[in-house]
Amino acid sequence: MLANKTVVLGVTGSIAAYKAADIASKLTQAGAEVRVVMTQPATRFISPLTLSTISHRPVVTSMWQLETEFSTEHVALAEAADVVVIAPATANIIAHLAAGMADDMLSCIVLATRAPVILAPAMNVNMFQNAITQQNLAKLKARGFVIVGPEYGRLASGKMGLGRLAEVEQILGTIKQVLGRKGDLADKHIVVTAGGTREPIDPVRHLGNHATGKMGHALALAARDRGARVRLITTAAPAETAGIEVSRVETAVQMKQAVVKAVAQADALIMAAAVADYRPRSIAKAKIKKETPSLTLELTRTPDILAEVTGDFIKIGFAAESEDIVTNARRKLKEKGLHLIMANDITDKDSGFGVDTNKVTIIDRSGKVESLPLLTKREVADRILDKVVGLLAKR
Ligand code: CTP
């Protein structure tokens, strides 16, 4: 995704400038060519040497320092960029860009580039909330700039407020989303469910399962990186959600409500969630005390979401099996009216709960069975999405 992409990383004078080192490092590790451009104030917060060492390239800090002629260099960088990211972006650079000014190397590049530009603002809360900054951001957004963050948190002043640089993972996710915009799922709307549902017993206890949401979260990120609009309905907190619409739910009933709402405009539904098949018939209002030597819970069926939601979309399920894997998965595919089902053997330690790998067998409507080797969940996600692209093309 990031390999061989040219990312112009603009760094401006905020205390959060030190985090640019982490961003540059992660981009470089992912195979991107990182070209760092710093404003003069940024060099007061972090050394250009740090960023040039991390990015393995000279860092541009002024229009006048260059060995090559600046007039060609800023155009060269603007043209080479697949994406321009300014992280952190101060109120000052935001104002300069909104005014169309080009009085330093970074603003020259932004004005000259045709690549998408991402801004990750970081500043004092009052500066951020100032109507002028807000107007500037709104203007840039309307012009197609992508804004990520800021977040609420502890600011340099020691006070809590909105103005903290977005998490590095979120900034990297935004870069991937922007680079993937024209991918093979562009304009498609994919709904993904993830995690294990939790069915309450009383105010402190629930019935749950071992699912962690990793497979569903990998699917959501992979679909986003291929250009899809993604709605992730999950019971677990994903590590990164840039550009993804997230609905947090707890129970099977809540998940069903969220799925029904989301599929109205969806091209595909992928149910990777481990949905409880039963829930306690009633939820105790007060904590159940250990007064009796034994306790019987009466359970009742939850809705079978995958079987019950219908519509004009591709429907994909998973089948967690411990025996007769293909036979059971085939039956589920038929009973739930699916286009595809991914069967996995939950007794295999590499494809069980909470691990980063999975080994699935893909079964389609024609009965074709394809066993994939052991792959990372991200690789499995991309294999599934290859199938989705094929199925959508046939519609
Ligand atoms: N599923 C669902 N709603 C449920 C149970 C399961 O939508 N109440 C979905 C899962 O997300 C998965 C598929 O159905 O995509 C199969 O789930 P699985 O638990 O393997 O199958 P069940 O239908 O629950 O059958 P069983 O537990 O009897 O194996």
Image (cartoon, rainbow, N blue to C red):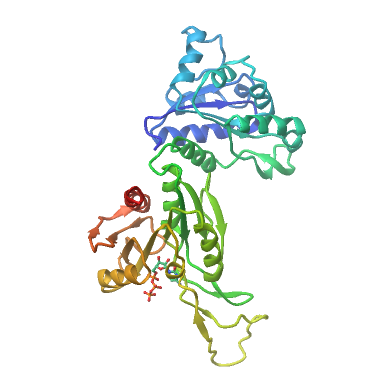
Query: Is residue 182 positioned above or below 228 on the image?
Result: above
Query: Is residue 73 positioned above or below 348 on the image?
Result: above
Give the side of residue 304 with respect to residue 395, left or right. Answer: right
Instruction: State the residue at coordinates (42%, 36%).
Output: 182
Q: In which image quadrant can residue 170 be found?
A: top right
Along the line of sight, the residue nearer the viewer: 46 or 81: 81
Give the side of residue 154 with respect to residue 387, left or right. Answer: right
Residue 58 visible (yes or no): no
Q: Residue 19 at x, y = what percent? A: 56, 35
Q: Residue 285 at x, y = what percent? A: 67, 80
How many tags in the picture?
0
Q: In which image quadrant can residue 61 be found?
A: top right
Along the line of sight, the residue nearer the viewer: 260 or 232: 260
Q: Residue 22 at x, y = what percent? A: 51, 36
Q: Quadrant of the N terminus?
A: top left
Instruction: State the residue at coordinates (56%, 12%).
Output: 63
Residue 172 visible (yes or no): yes
Instruction: State the residue at coordinates (41%, 44%).
Output: 185
Instruction: State the residue at coordinates (61%, 87%).
Output: 290
Query: Is residue 32 positioned above or below 340 on the image?
Result: above
Give the side of residue 65 with respect to residue 154, left or right. Answer: left
Q: Quarter of the picture for ligand 1? A: bottom left
Along the line of sight, the residue nearer the viewer: 49 or 305: 305
Query: Is residue 45 positioned above or below 179 on the image?
Result: above
Q: Residue 351 at x, y = what percent? A: 33, 61
